[in-house]
Amino acid sequence: MPTFSELSRAAYCPRQLYYARKHDEEGPPASVAEIQQLATRYRELREADDEALAALPIERSPAAYREALDSLSRRSEWEDLCAPAETDYYVEGKDCAGMLHKILAGDPPTPTLISPGEPPDEGVWKPQTVRAVAAAKALAWEREREIPRTLIEYPAVGVVRAVPLTTRRTATYRRVLRTVRAMDGPPPRVNDDRCESCEYRTECGVSTRSLKSLLGL
């Protein structure tokens, strides 16, 4: 059964997932856990001084970070984000399984996932959309009820984005799920901008271009 993280990686590049599985990656580095821990300290960090915030792995100035948390505190989910009903909750659905970083109390409950990065200007990144749908689907299967959305937390910048389960997002999730299920060898290379930063680009054999060649130097 694929995990949420595998589906997310496959949404970015199926071939990257193939190599990650081949090398049996153990999980994210410790630096990711440090950022994710920020999502358990929103109330404290909202009141923290510049020196305390400067020592943390945040991606905004202390003043901007406090302002972001002030804005977040005005949302209806604030209290539940600070005191969720469940944390680090493993859920197994019909088609996929994985860890929900939080489950917010409510009717229905809301699963949340914590990202160590920054969000795009609007919405969330496509791989995170697939992961969000997978999380909602798995929790819905366990609770035997519809879960209409997932939240993605970006604690390094104090931002939380909602991912409603639309028809288009669900279709994308199902397409990625089919791709992962059918994977029995290396999928086709994508050979585009994604390859430049991929840790498997040498093993994969894609032809990446240096900055000098792109500039014609």
Image (cartoon, rainbow, N blue to C red):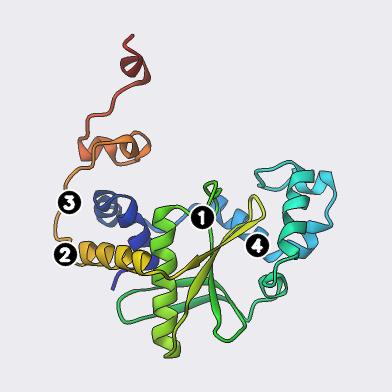
- Which label's residue is closer to the chain start, 3 or 4? 4
User: Which amino acid, by three-letter code, is at mark 3?
Assistant: Pro
Residue matched to label 2: 182
Q: CA distance from mark 2 to mark 4?
A: 36 Å
Residue 109 is situated, as x and y percent measured from the top left of the image, at 55, 82
Report if the CB atoms under discs 3 and 1 are less than 8 Å apart.
no
Q: Dot 1, crowdedness within 10 Å: few (<14), some or many (≥20)?
A: some
Given residues 26 and 86, the one toward you in this image is 86
- Which label's residue is closer to the chain start, 4 or 1? 4
Residue matched to label 4: 39
Q: CA distance from mark 1 to mark 2?
A: 29 Å
Q: CA distance from mark 4 to mark 1?
A: 19 Å
Viewer-side label of 1, 2 = 1
Q: CA distance from mark 2 to mark 3?
A: 10 Å
The answer to whether 63 is drawn above or below residue 141 in the figure is above
Determine the residue positioned at 63% across, 51% down.
156
Query: For numbered disc 3, what is the local secondary structure?
Result: loop
- Which label's residue is closer to the chain start, 3 or 1? 1
Name of the residue lying farthest toward the front: 167
The answer to whether 130 is drawn above or below residue 30 in the figure is below
Q: Dot 3, crowdedness within 10 Å: few (<14), some or many (≥20)?
A: some
Q: In the drawing, what numbered circle is on residue 187? A: 3
Residue 102 is situated, as x and y percent measured from the top left of the image, at 57, 73
Query: For numbered disc 1, what is the local secondary structure?
Result: loop
Query: For numbered disc 4, what is the local secondary structure?
Result: helix
